[in-house]
């Protein structure tokens, strides 16, 4: 391994550290003139911190089979920045909210976990 590879690793470690203690990985892709920066984090609190820090305002919850995760992103002038939280196996926030509303309508006070 030469000095250039060591410098690249140090620069990337520094960028990852600059995103905060919850950042797990950062990657960059270039596709058809677009630069795509992808960040993954360890939990939903870290995702919120990265979203606030980078001003990522397009938030959504995505499902993949029985698994769901949160993602935030922003698009501007040929740049897409995406940050994603960890996968969850429990009920998604949308399901929990629907069950809570149903319980309120039926007069039930038990929450869904």
Image: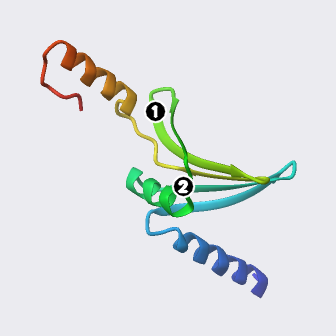
Q: Which residue is mark 2?
A: 40
Dot 1 alpha-carbon crowd within 10 angstroms: few under 14, some 14 to 19, many 20 or more? some
The reply to whether residue 76 is visible in this rendering is: yes
Q: Which mark is residue 7?
A: none
3 in relation to 22, above or below: below
Task: Give percent across and percent down for residue 90.
Answer: 35, 33
Q: Identify the residue at image location x=41%, y=39%.
A: 88
Task: Give percent across and percent down for residue 67.
Answer: 46, 33
Q: As rendered, which of 20 and 1 lies closer to the eye?
A: 20
Q: As rendered, which of 109 and 11 lies closer to the eye?
A: 109
Q: Which residue is mark 1?
A: 67
* Callout 2: SS: strand
Quadrant of the rendering where the N terminus is positioned = bottom right
- Whichever of callouts 1 and 2 sits on the residue coming sooner in the sequence is 2
Q: Identify the residue at image location x=35%, y=30%.
A: 91
Rendered image quadrant of residue 107: top left
Q: Identify the residue at image location x=76%, y=87%.
A: 3
Rendered image quadrant of residue 30: bottom right
Task: Give percent across and percent down for residue 45.
Answer: 38, 55
Q: Identify the residue at image location x=19%, y=19%.
A: 104
Q: Residue furthest right?
A: 32
Quadrant of the rendering where the C terminus is positioned = top left
What separation in Å lies between label 1 and label 2 (alpha carbons)?
16 Å
Dot 2 alpha-carbon crowd within 10 angstroms: few under 14, some 14 to 19, many 20 or more? many
Rendered image quadrant of residue 16: bottom right
For the residues bearing labels 1 and 2, Cβ distance under 8 angstroms: no
* Callout 1: SS: strand
């Amino acid at each position: 391994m030469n000095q250039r590879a060591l410098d690249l690793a140090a620069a990337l470690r520094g960028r990852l550290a600059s995103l905060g203690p919850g950042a797990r990985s950062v990657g960059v892709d270039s596709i058809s003139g677009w630069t795509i920066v992808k960040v993954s984090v360890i939990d939903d609190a870290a995702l919120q911190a990265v979203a606030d820090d980078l001003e990522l305002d397009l938030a959504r919850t995505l499902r993949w089979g029985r698994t769901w995760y949160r993602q935030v992103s922003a698009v501007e002038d040929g740049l897409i920045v995406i940050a994603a939280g960890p996968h969850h196996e429990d009920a998604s926030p949308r399901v929990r909210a629907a069950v809570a509303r149903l319980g309120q309508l039926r007069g039930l006070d038990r929450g869904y976990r």
